[in-house]
Amino acid sequence: MKQILYIFTLCILLALGFTACQTEDPLTLEQQQQEMKKRDSKKHPKLEYVTTTVNNSATVSSPKQSSRLKYSVKNNGETLHVFFKLDFGDAVSVTIKDMDNNAYVHEPVAYLKSGKEFVINPATHFPYYFEIISGNIQFIGIISEE
């Protein structure tokens, strides 16, 4: 009878031991949830063309014409850096506005062939809308967070 009682007690202790090993520490779960929130909050800016117009003929993201515009978009905390470069030497006007139509950048640029960086500080009103307009070409697009 004592042997059965010892075996039964041993089985219960083993079952409790395995169960205790399978449960996770609540602090660890909180840390995992915070890590997931951090990963989800790291949004990156994304630039998309809405239309491209060449000599008053509108096209939607024409690969031939959109390849004339090179760009990069970076978000460093609260500052948005937008770099535009065109493969032709026309004078252009660059405008970047937020969704409330507040202009953050509105300037004529004599030469974008070598490229120019525009800085929006603070960059907290996404999405931003941009226009690059010259006598021959017009790029209209949106800068959003993904």
Image (cartoon, rainbow, N blue to C red):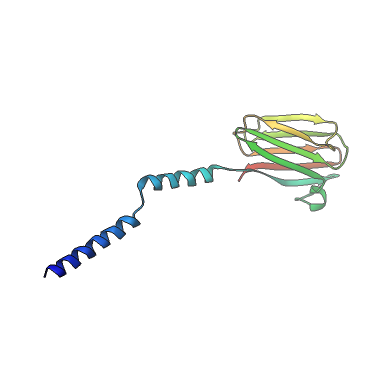
In this picture, residue 28 sits left or right of residue 97: left
Q: How many marks?
A: 0
The residue sitting at the front extreme is 3
Q: Would you place residue 66 above or below residue 18 in this image?
A: above
Q: Nearer the viewer, residue 35 or 8?
A: 8
Query: How far across and how far down the image is residue 62, in percent?
Result: 79, 52
Q: Would you place residue 29 above or below residue 109 in this image?
A: below
Q: Which of 79 and 137 is in front in this view?
A: 79
The residue sitting at the left extreme is 1
In this picture, residue 132 sits left or right of residue 144: right
In this picture, residue 122 sits left or right of residue 4: right
The quarter of the picture where residue 109 lies is: top right
Q: Which residue is drawn at 86% across and 38% down?
A: 135
Query: How far across and how far down the image is residue 50, in percent?
Result: 71, 46
The quarter of the picture where residue 87 lies is: top right
Q: Nearer the viewer, residue 111 or 56?
A: 111
Query: How far across and how far down the image is residue 130, in percent?
Result: 72, 38
Query: How far across and how far down the image is residue 19, in percent?
Result: 30, 58
Q: Considering the image in quadrants, where does the N terminus appear?
A: bottom left
Q: Residue at x 87, y 37 (%)?
A: 90
In this picture, residue 25 sits left or right of residue 65: left
Q: Which residue is drawn at 67% across and 39% down?
A: 74
Q: Residue at x 77, y 38 (%)?
A: 84
